[in-house]
Amino acid sequence: MGKKVEKSMKGDKNPSAVSQDEEDPNKTPEPYNCTGNFQQDFTELCRRNNMASIPNVIHRARVPTFSAPESSKPEKGKDKGKQAVPEPEPEPELDPEGELVDPPPKTYTVKDKFEYFKPSVQVEMENYDKPDTVSEMFVRGWKIDDQMMNTFKQCWSVMEKLHTINLWNVGLTGETVSIMASTLTSIANLRTLILDGNAVKEENWHELIHDDSPVQNLSVRHCCITDKGAAKLGEALGTVKRANTKLISLNLSGNRITDEGVVHLGNGLRMNRTLMSLSLASNQVGDKGASKIGEVLSRFPLSHEEVVERRRQKSTMSSPDRLKTPPPSRRADSKDRPGSVRSSSQHDRVDKTKQKPSAKKKDEKGKGKEELDKSKGGKKEEKAPAKKASIAADTKTAGKGKGKGKEKGKPTQQEPEDMGGSDFVNPLTDEADFIDGQLFVAGNRVLINLNLSRNEIGEPGMAALLKAMQYQTTLLHGSKAGGTGLMRICVLKNKIAPEHDTMKKLNELMLPKDPYAKGGAQTPDGESTT
């Protein structure tokens, strides 16, 4: 009896202990490690955050594809004697009054009327059989707060195939934009970021295109961006000492940017040589802003700060070893003897050269062959791992004579070549023309698409754009400045009539360059040229 009572007591203790552990509010749950399966990770993180309603993860709706109906004729060689039996037609439905009711079409599925308005996350996959291949994500019309953005942040960081994020009218704030900007570096394959319809008071959109951001296409249409946000974006595009080297397309249409903001964007385009498409449609751009863009696209005078930076760049290009520390081989030599003795070392070298013929006469057969073998073997060892640049550097040092083994393979000599091959090449180092006491350099020729439609540009601003296009077509033809120049410009619905002479000349000049006009295809913005 005693043993049975002890067993029953033990059995009663275990469930109570487990229940206490489960109901213990002070116990912190273990952190969840995302697996890459977005639907599973997103649902689990929302459940752990005690969200009242968890948005559904659904596939993005596609346009249905219609296939030709299969023929009812039997195939040759199969069931020749049998006849195809037609399927019985369904009985027609009748309403209470006895009239026929048309059946619903089979090209879509009928859902509850309120289900369409429920929050959901739409996804596109590369392979629908593999849930970890989500490549595009779309969120429409429901609020994304800080907690939800942190949840997305944890999921995005492990999604290897994700390349497009589209958040339309989700009520972003300055804090949620900063959270998104902090996680962009962990999304290696992200290329397109669309955040249309989000009015952010802080206007910190420039955080999304920092130096480490992989975003190449940024769209912030109808986000109430003013000149304050445009100034930050212009600084992020480029300054005197640095420039963005990732962003290719920037869409700022439908905002509140005036001439002041366009001036800041133009200053960013002075040093930027990566951006290829810029849209400022449906803003408040006037003649001053259009003239600024025309100046940046043709040629522009350097400011005092830019002249100073140009001189610094030129000096580093002419003498790259000026800012570098001496190589370690020289330091090793200086430790052995002071600098005053190094000048007298030439007498020792002369004495050694005088002794070399006597040494060769004694050991012509022995040491002479060994030295030849060593010299041949040393050349082979240098050619195998060395690059073309290092071979050229070695030949220069060997031509000067007295090339020691330590000085032939200096690693510091390759540093200027590596720095010169970086992504950002400062445009200030291009050839400049001295006109009226100012230095003029070639403007931006990398930008190929510009949309200025539905603004307030008049005849002076349009004339400045026409002058810039004429300069790119004629004066810059065959110059060393990189790029093809502007290929498409859209200036519809401004303060100047399409029948104006300036508009006609601009249209005649740009029409042969427009790739969309040649093929008759529709432009990305759904608009024609001038």
Image (spheres, rainbow, N blue to C red):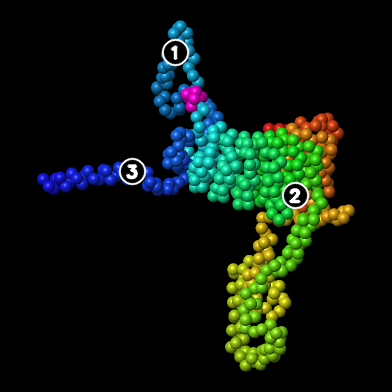
SS state under label 1: strand
Circles 2 and 1 in contact, beta carbons < 8 Å:
no
Circles 3 and 2 in contact, beta carbons < 8 Å:
no
Q: Is residue 295 above or below residue 110?
A: below
- Image point (28%, 45%), residue name: 17
Q: Position of residue 488 (x, y in %)?
A: 74, 39
Q: Earlier in the sequence, mark 1 or mark 3?
A: 3
Q: Which mark is residue 8?
A: none
Which residue bears the numbered disc 3? 22
User: Which residue reaches farthest top?
Assistant: 97
User: Which residue reaches farthest front?
Assistant: 26
Which residue bears the numbered disc 1? 93
Q: CA distance from mark 2 to mark 1?
A: 71 Å
Residue 54 or 467: which is nearer the viewer? 54
Q: CA distance from mark 3 to mark 2?
A: 62 Å
Q: Position of residue 479 (x, y in %)?
A: 80, 52
Q: Earlier in the sequence, mark 3 or mark 2?
A: 3
Name the mark nearer the viewer: 3 or 2.
3
Is residue 108 part of the magenta span, yes or no? yes
Q: Is residue 136 above or below residue 313?
A: above
Residue type at mark 2?
Arg
Main SS of the magenta part reads loop
- Image point (25%, 45%), residue name: 14
Residue 408 or 59: which is nearer the viewer? 59
In magenta, the rendered stretch is 107-115
Q: Is residue 190 above or below residue 397?
A: above
- Image point (87%, 55%), residue name: 437
Residue type at mark 1?
Glu
Q: Position of residue 525 (x, y in %)?
A: 68, 35
Residue 446 can be seen, yes or no: no
Which residue bears the numbered disc 2? 270
Q: Quadrant of the N terminus?
A: top left
